Amino acid sequence: MKILTASAMRWAEQAAVDAGETFEGLMETAGRKAAGILMEEVPLPNGPVLILCGKGNNGGDGLVIARALAQKGIPVQVVFLLGRKLSPLAEKNLGRLQGLPAEILDAASIAPEERDALCKNAGLIVDGVFGTGFSGDLPENVRAWTAAANQSKAVRAALDIPSGLNCDTGLFGKDAFAADITVTFAAHKPAHFLKGSRGLCGRVFCADIGIRQEILAAAPGHITLLDGDEAKKGIPRRKEDSNKGDYGKLLAVGGCTHMTGAILMASLAALHCGVGLLKAAVPEPVCPLIAARMPEVIYLPVIPAKSGVLPASCGEALLKETEWADGVLLGCGMSVCEDTVSLTRKLLSCGKSMVIDADGLNCVAQDVNILKSRKAPTILTPHIKEFSRLTGKAIPEIKADRFSLASEFARQYGVTLVLKDSNTVVAAPDGRLWMNANGNSGMAKAGSGDVLAGIIASFLAQGIPPELAAMAGVFLHGEAGDAAAADLTPYCMTASKMVDYFPRVFAKWAAR
């Protein structure tokens, strides 16, 4: 499924017009399709339909809906919230309402008690005020209407995006329109899936308005929603006539004496995703802790520095070990200090595919340009704060522009980026984007990222291309998290327990 940002949607509309459609025709189709969906999904008439219109094309869509409903004999009330200075297309569609049973009102001339009564008595309230172009806070006069609408028992429907909600970031302020139904046009938008905002959208219906799929797929900056079919492309195939050497060798470098769990959980996840051999290069005191849980691991014990971390002096030996491996996982529980920064720089010079996670990323952040010297495929798995360190950008800035920033970073440094959050974003080195929508709040716990890093590294070591390994890893991680939450609740599930649910996900994929 293709997801379009506001700018990508504008591009697609213009491309459709350049290919022979008209903006007027697109609006007519959008309004008619939306009216059809509303008549099918909402028990009409149940009180009049109240349509809140802005002055732009979202309001124009609302006016087409008003005409379609009025022609069916459904009582309609249209209220202009931003005045009567309308866009040309909205003005044209207002004229087409003449002679139909539709009451036209101006919000400026309506007293607060009348406003509240209109909302209370409506059977359906349609929000056609702002649409995809909105950002910031709602104007005070609009907020009064959305607040009244939200308090009504009427069914609430939004066109494209509820007013007050930013299409691309999912951010919204006080009294944003809370929709029971959203009818979006041509393609879904990020806010329909972002977990902070999807509840505000209600059930989302996508109306085909005549923009060809190849145009939507060509829109710059479009995002692909991760699903099981997409993720399955990154699952290594297993043959009956095979041996452990056919499924890759992974070198996992990390751990320190005061953080032992991260490398253990990453290794546990990697083994449960099919890698043939796993060698853990860890400080010597960490080895017995891993061995107690995973006897299958090969150990490369390293005498730690006084601080308990892997010392810089082991760099040459570990670089030599990378020659054995098909993939390297670097950073889980490694700590950040002069020793580990030096070790990270040394290992980055290896010619093997690599996943860099956690403290490996924090070491890279000391000089992010070192990534440009990498010749082999590289996957970075930062959470928002780690990405802030890598880019020097503030966390609010990243949250407000995560898609373009992820795409830009992946292009600039030639890496596959897995930007972890409640909706994880995957960016390929050519800038292509994917977003996941599975997972739950129970995954917001220590160790969850280490499990994800182990999954992705396992697939990478088995020869899966980086972007496919990242996509499969992110989706598997979310599916296992959802299965764990269903059984254990988000409160009681832990990162290591999620690994117990991998078989359920692999079995589901095998049945597809």
Image (tube, rainbow, N blue to C red):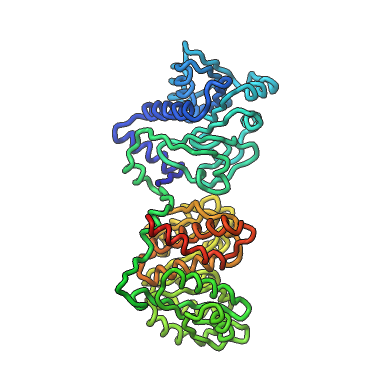
Residue 187 shows in this picture: yes
Q: Quadrant of residue 307?
A: bottom right
Identify which residue, 172 or 135, lies in the foreground: 172
Picture coordinates of residue 451, whole percent (x, y): 52, 67
Picture coordinates of residue 155, whole percent (x, y): 57, 30
Q: Residue at x 63, y 24 (%)?
A: 119
Q: Residue at x 56, y 55 (%)?
A: 486
Number of marks in the rendered image: 0
Furthest residue toward top: 99
252 sits left or right of 112 in the view: left
- Give the vertical position of 283 relative to 237 (above or below): below
Q: Quadrant of residue 373?
A: bottom left
- Give the vertical position of 257 relative to 93 (above or below): below
471 sits left or right of 302 in the view: left
Q: Residue at x 55, y 49 (%)?
A: 195
Picture coordinates of residue 406, whole percent (x, y): 47, 57
Picture coordinates of residue 466, whole percent (x, y): 39, 65
Furthest residue toward right: 113
Residue 390 shows in this picture: no
321 sits left or right of 301 in the view: left
Q: Quadrant of the C terminus?
A: bottom left
